[in-house]
Image: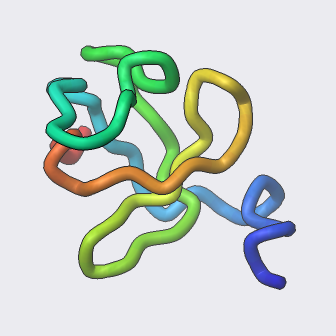
Amino acid sequence: MIHQSWNKQETLKKVKCIHTDAAKYIVNRTLTVGNIYDVKNETEEFYFIIDNSGKIGGFYKDYFQDA
């Protein structure tokens, strides 16, 4: 249950949102283009960040670039 402590973990890096054009999901409610987000965990395909709702969310890496 490591996901319950991600809010308290150190930030791995910062990423900037470059688009919210999702083919399958609605992400423009939780991400804002141009905002910089703290990455709390990372997998091969996803970044786990604190999104606009203040909660941890997993998003595809193609929405971001390194800040």
50 relative position to 26: left or right: right
In this image, 10 relative to 42: left or right?
Answer: right
User: Residue 44: percent from the left, percent from the top?
Assistant: 26, 80
Front in this rendered view, residue 22 or 50: 22
Task: Identify the colour scheme used.
Answer: rainbow
Residue farthest toward the front in the current orientation of the protein:
24
The x and y percentages for residue 59 are 38, 51
Does residue 14 sit above or below 45 in this rendering? above
Image-based side of 60 in relation to 6, left or right? left
Which residue is at the front of the view, 54 or 25?
A: 25
Please tell me which residue lies in front, 62 or 21: 21
Quadrant of residue 8 within the rendered picture:
bottom right
Residue 66 vs residue 41, the one in the foreground: 41
Determine the residue positioned at 72% across, 30% down: 54
Instruction: Tell me the quarter of the picture where residue 61 sits.
Output: bottom left
| Residue 28, position as x, y percentages in the image | 37, 19
Q: Quadrant of the C terminus?
A: top left
Instruction: Count the marks.
Output: 0
Q: Quadrant of the N terminus?
A: bottom right
Residue 56 in the image: above or below residue 51: below
- Residue 27 at x, y percent in the picture: 38, 29
User: Relative to 11, is 29 above or below?
Assistant: above
Q: Residue at x 84, y 68 (%)?
A: 5
Q: Which residue is drawn at 27% across and 30% down?
A: 17
